[in-house]
Amino acid sequence: MSNWRYPVTPIMTDSLIREWIEQEKERGPKPTAFDTPLRFSSAGDCSRALGYQALKYPITNAFDAPAVWVTGLGTIIHEMVQDAIGRRYPGAVFEPKGAVHGLTSGHADGVIDGETIQAVIPNWDGGRALFELKTMGGFAFEKSIGLKRRAKEIDNPEGPRVSALLQSAINAYVHDCDTLIIGSISLEAASRGVAAGAGLDEIGRFIAEWHIPKSVWMKWATAEIERQRNIVESAQKGWLSQPVIVEDVDDEGLVHRSIDPTSSRPYWKCDYCAYKEQCVADGNGILEVN
Ligand code: SF4
């Protein structure tokens, strides 16, 4: 008798992802908003990957099915949340294009004037806001808010991912905003028991938001723009730098870390990098390209 407890090859449940994978193939690589070498969403990426991108190297590691799925769900959630923000804050602007000319460009999830927010939240004193939304799995969400499952407590939150901080900081710089509002929506809620112990309410089990003033984010934006400019200028002169990632931000600016995709424990982003095969074939160190 067959053991029905083992899952079989899907013939129904994978129907939507099969369509999305085909659509992803037909779409091909997305153009940048203003035909710039880089895009805002690449903020914080490894210097080698940014060099490949600036020189329009072909992608060697396309999105796999889970990446297509997570990105597709993220897009649907973005559109629905943006619609709801528009109903709550009439006058909010979504997906405005922006650029640091000749370098990087992209779209902001939302830009909302201070008076528009004050009409709903009268004590808002953060001025013009840049809204950035990220969806993520439960593990990443718990790390960002510092939720410790075993101890059932909140301790030492990491905050939003550095890539989200830098992407939104550059957007805020370009759109002349005062405050970054970064929102996270987890695709998996913290359990009721853990949340009760940690003092999280029902919204806090899967939604978090951070408000970051200009005095904090501006130095991240300017440092990342300068880093990207150096990388692009080097690439255009025929040099690809050795791989260095922005691992974190602090009060001074960016915290860098050298990485190597061939090391015994490669940095996690290498496993998701669109240029991994190219990078491994090229080897570590500074590369001269023709
Ligand atoms: S594989 Fe890793 S080191 Fe190489 S370009 Fe990608 S992120 Fe950078």
Image (cartoon, helix red, strand yellow):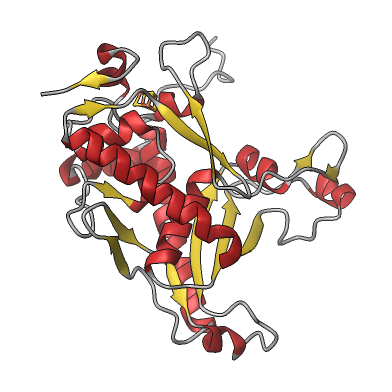
Count of marks overlaid on the render:
0
Toward the left, the furthest residue is: 290
Q: Is residue 83 something one can see in this rendering? A: no
> How far across and how far down the image is residue 168, in percent?
47, 58
**Left or right placement of residue 254 versus residue 140 in this view:** left
> How far across and how far down the image is residue 137, in percent?
57, 42
Residue at 52% from the left image edge and 87% from the top image edge: 116
Q: Is residue 129 above or below residue 116?
A: above
Find ligand 1 in the image and state its quadrant. top left
Q: Is residue 47 above or below residue 197?
A: above
Residue at 84% from the left image edge and 33% from the top image edge: 150
**Left or right placement of residue 161 versus residue 155 in this view:** left
| 192 vs 154, nearest the viewer | 154
> How far across and how far down the image is residue 192, in percent?
80, 49
**Left or right placement of residue 20 versus residue 182 in this view:** left
Q: Is residue 78 something one can see in this rendering? A: yes
Residue at 64% from the left image edge and 37% from the top image edge: 139
| 7 vs 145, nearest the viewer | 145
